[in-house]
Image: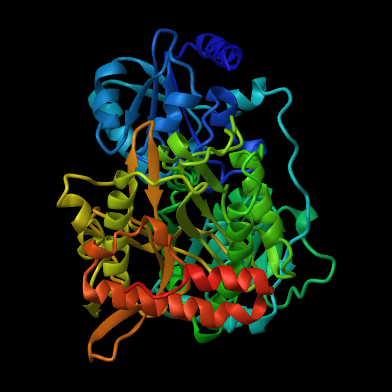
Amino acid sequence: MIKNIYNLLKILKEKKCQFYLISTLDEHLSEYSSKRNMRLKWLTNFSGSNGFALLSQKEKFFFTDGRYTLQAKKEIDKSFNIFDIGLVDFFSLLSKKLKNKKLLIDFKIFKIDFLIKLKKIAKKNNIKIIHDKNNSIDLIWHDRPSEKKKKFFFIDEELIGENSNSKIKRLMDNINYDTLIINSSESVCWLLNIRGFDLPFTPVVQSRMIIFKSNVKVFVDKDKIPEKVDNSKFKFYPIEKFEREILKLPKKSSILLDELTPYYFLEIMLSNGLKPEIKKDPCELLRSQKNVTEINNARKAHFVDAISLVKYFFWLENINKNSEHTELSVSEKLESFRRENKDFFCSSFQTISASGPSGSIIHYNPSIKPKKLIRGELYLCDSGGQYFNGTTDVTRTIMVGNKKIKKEYISNYTKVLMGHINLSMIKFPVGTKGNQLDCIARFHLWQSGMDYNHGTGHGVGSFLGVHEGPQSISKRNSLFELKEGMIISNEPGFYKNEKYGIRIENLLLVKKSKFSGFLEFETLTLYPYERDLIDRKALSNSQVSWLNSYHSTVYKKLAKNLSKDIREWLYRKTKKLK
């Protein structure tokens, strides 16, 4: 990594710039980039999904969110100053460090709002921003992986519940523009009912789209287009022609530009007399509210996923005490159980398989330096699957082995569980936003001066991204209310640095309550909690009642599909708490 940084700084010097800025994003601003586009990882060794580095000949700064700060300190070179972007204002630091300097940055891999703010700061502080047209990292990354060229595929309407023409009509009926420009590959794939193989964990083909009142233009790598495609619905163009096509738009037309579009495209549009309005992708809200077909298929996906989870945790509990299994090898075993299902496509994210101290790293990656599982330690497993009928995401924390459990583990696990149950049980008025529910999950932790440095809930797609907006549950103020049909996670936690981590996560469906004007949650995930870590005396009667009802549901739904020994094991796991 030091050599990579040295070579980049050499180019920086040749271009007479003092600073270079690079992020985890690719040209489609994807959450999970392909190996070919993991430029920040190649440069710094950081393997998380959100971070950026600012480098000069003398100083190196690295910024990430609270999920990844500990991970960054372990993965990247000690010469970097590492900051939590939730605690440190990046733009304030920029103002101090870059005054009267030149900054090199690739406009194609940064969001519009970020560059607009950056340019305002630059103007005030005489910072010259230069577009890194050919991307300096690409020039020196000599063994850069090649791009996958697998053809995308169409999904049967029985799995989706709505055809593409209907979706496009609904979308355009909701906006008052001549033209809509969509950069999000997830939105394109959702609208057209297609999926692909371009990214790890997210089944999309990287693509862009221009939608007019009368026709639709889709931009994708021509080598990824199936042989039999009906062009009467929408016309496919080579993705490299996207830039040329947007510049053909009439200068007086009203254009909505998806805010998650690289800044580069906004700049060329403005320089050619086009005046797009930058707004949130209108597909996001539409696709976040699942239809009846998608909801029923989500239940099916969670059912088969639960069978895999039960088999996995049964296997894990019964492996030989002298086993040499590591965090990585057991996570591979979990995937093998998921792969037994014919509808399994891939994992929905890199499994967080963390034993003992590893669990304190919120988004721990076991593939870097996998540790052996140690009996008597907590083991945190956060995993998920992409199935043709839905996307799953589930976390459980268990004890490894049958050693005496520390009271601290029981006490803190129970606090996390109580917040998790309280959020599961809540009924809330229509119009409620996620930030208004967040403290419910944190209440019992806060009463003991404890907290966790991540959101409580994120939206989840239908055989799409495991992280999907606009819904969320977190401390951050939200502009979007929770609506019927949305799927969202419920994942409070607690992390003791260098010691252990606890997280419990289910996916929830927002649905109508029996009370008029109210909504509530249906729990989709089907897997029991760790009985040995629960302090029954700390739970209220209503919490125990909810827990017993949930465990009863888990057993009834899964038991028939399990072998006798696993069924008996699950019965013990789901017995009533008294």
Residue 356, position in %: x, y?
45, 38
Q: Residue at x 46, y 67 (%)?
A: 528
Residue 280 seen anywhere in this rendered image of the structure: no
Q: Quadrant of the C terminus?
A: bottom left
| Quarter of the figure with the N terminus | top right
Residue at 72% x, 61% y is: 339
**Horizontal and vertical percent for residue 288?**
44, 71
Could you tell whether 267 is left or right of 210 in the image? left
Residue 450 higher or lower than 549, as above or below: above
Q: Is residue 80 visible?
A: yes
The residue lying toward the viewer, choosing from 319 and 527, is 319
Residue 299, quarter of picture: bottom right
Residue in the foreground of this view, choosing between 225 and 373: 373
Q: Vertical placement of 200 versus 325: above or below?
A: below
Tell me which colouring the rendered structure shows: rainbow
Quadrant position of residue 253? bottom left
Instruction: Estimate the x, y position of residue 309 in percent, counting from the top left.
Output: 58, 63
Q: Residue at x 47, y 36 (%)?
A: 358
Splitting the image into 4 quarters, where does residue 255 fall? bottom left
